């Protein structure tokens, strides 16, 4: 399904369970499975208990977490979104300049950056803690949209768990938790776990507030005619090929006029504009990817079929808001 923050394939583990009354051990467990944090317990830790049952399914970690006494904590979220779904009790959050309270009717959602403060977590709190890899969630969004997104994804801080997609998402996570107690269940099968993980990612994207949610919730467009799909497949398979509109019409098996009308109706643009957009996406991906070998704007542009660098630069800036050399400079530092 992708790679973790070190570039290795996502791993899975669990479920595993721990119970402790030691505050330092609790900090270590939370750090191991979720995020580095500070944890403060009133009254010197008297009566403190912590328990967790946790599993990792590729880019998604789900933990059933319980605290026996009131606690407060603060943590840094890096390279991952985090969702708290309280089952019992309440917690207060401060993140990104906003304060909000989560409980059984409303979950809390945190960005993959900045300090998160939880100044009060009620005694007896039990919640489902969900850690989601940043790149996996954004890749799922791009897959659902059928195109690249621009910039980091900004999710709203709260999730309604009582109605609509939020209620469904809570039930889906509850199913994952229930399957942790079923050692021979389907969740242990990689193909099923992969589909379940994608369902969690898609469910969060359909539930949380973000700039692309309205687009995701629109009714699905009608299927493309086979002629249009043949041309789209040819473009996406070999966007560096020197296609002309006549070439694409031959691939599609229709006249140039029919192909142009089909693309305008089903793709929202002419065939050659779609070809240019796909080429720009490949250029952008190459110039944004860390760890690639030395490259120049000209070499990457030529690789994907752009021969006029001036027109290429204008089209690139119109699509991404940057000039090509600015993207390349950020990659190389």
Image: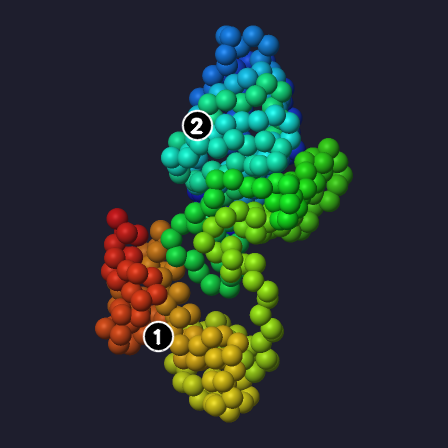
**Mark 1: few/some/many CA within 10 Å (<14, 14-19, 20+):** many
* Residue occupying image coordinates x 44% and y 60%: 148
> Could you say where residue 262 lies in the image, as x and y percent from the top left?
52, 82
* Residue occupying image coordinates x 64% and y 31%: 87
> Could you say where residue 31 lies in the image, as x and y percent from the top left?
49, 27
Q: With respect to residue 289, does 50 lie above or below? A: above
Residue 120 left/right relative to 161: left
What element does badge 1 sit on? loop
* Residue occupying image coordinates x 48% and y 56%: 212
Q: Quadrant of residue 298?
A: bottom left
Q: Nearer the viewer, residue 231 or 317?
A: 317
What element does badge 2 sit on? strand
Q: Nearer the viewer, residue 78 or 265?
A: 265
Disc count in the image?
Answer: 2
What's the colour scheme? Answer: rainbow
> Could you say where residue 119 lies in the image, as x and y percent from the top left?
46, 23
Residue 132 left/right relative to 326: right
Q: Nearer the viewer, residue 189 or 66?
A: 66
How far apart are the alpha carbons under marks 2 and 1? 49 Å
Q: Nearer the viewer, residue 95 or 48?
A: 95
Residue 187 left/right relative to 245: right
Q: Which residue is mark 2?
A: 117
**Mark 2: few/some/many CA within 10 Å (<14, 14-19, 20+):** some
Q: With respect to residue 202, does 240 lie above or below? A: below
* Residue occupying image coordinates x 52% and y 18%: 71
> Could you say where residue 82 lies in the image, as x and y percent from the top left?
51, 38
Q: Which residue is mark 1?
A: 305
Q: Nearer the viewer, mark 2 or mark 1?
A: 2
Of the two numbered discs 2 and 1 on the same chain, state the one appearing first in sequence: 2
């Amino acid at each position: 399904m992708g790679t973790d923050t070190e570039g290795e394939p996502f791993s899975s583990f669990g479920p595993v369970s721990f119970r402790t009354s030691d505050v330092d051990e609790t900090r270590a467990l939370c750090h191991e499975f979720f995020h580095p944090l500070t944890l403060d317990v009133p009254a010197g830790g008297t009566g403190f208990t912590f328990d967790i049952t946790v599993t990792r399914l590729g880019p998604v970690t789900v933990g059933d977490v319980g605290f026996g006494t009131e606690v407060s904590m603060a943590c840094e979220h890096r390279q991952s979104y985090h969702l708290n779904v309280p089952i019992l009790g309440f917690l207060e959050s401060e993140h990104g300049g906003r304060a909000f309270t989560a409980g059984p009717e409303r979950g809390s959602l945190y960005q993959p950056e900045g300090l998160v403060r939880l100044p009060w977590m009620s005694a007896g709190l039990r919640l489902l803690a969900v850690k989601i890899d940043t790149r996996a969630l954004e890749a799922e969004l791009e897959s659902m949209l059928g195109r690249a997104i621009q910039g980091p994804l900004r999710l709203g801080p709260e999730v309604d768990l009582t109605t609509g997609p939020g209620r469904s998402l809570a039930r889906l996570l509850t199913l994952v938790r229930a399957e942790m107690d079923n050692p021979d269940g389907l969740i242990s099968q990689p193909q099923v776990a992969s589909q379940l993980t994608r369902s969690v990612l898609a469910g969060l994207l359909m539930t949380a507030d973000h700039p692309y949610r309205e687009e995701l919730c629109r009714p699905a467009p009608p299927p493309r005619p086979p002629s249009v799909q043949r041309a789209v497949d040819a473009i996406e398979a070999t966007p560096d090929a020197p296609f002309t509109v006549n070439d694409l019409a031959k691939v599609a098996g229709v006249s140039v006029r029919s192909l142009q009308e089909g693309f305008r109706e089903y793709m929202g643009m002419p065939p050659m504009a779609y070809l240019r957009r796909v080429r720009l996406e490949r250029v952008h991906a190459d110039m944004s990817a860390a760890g690639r070998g030395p490259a120049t704007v000209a070499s990457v542009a030529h690789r994907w079929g752009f021969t006029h660098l001036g027109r290429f630069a204008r089209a690139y800036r119109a699509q991404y808001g940057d000039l090509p050399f600015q993207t390349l400079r950020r990659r190389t530092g």
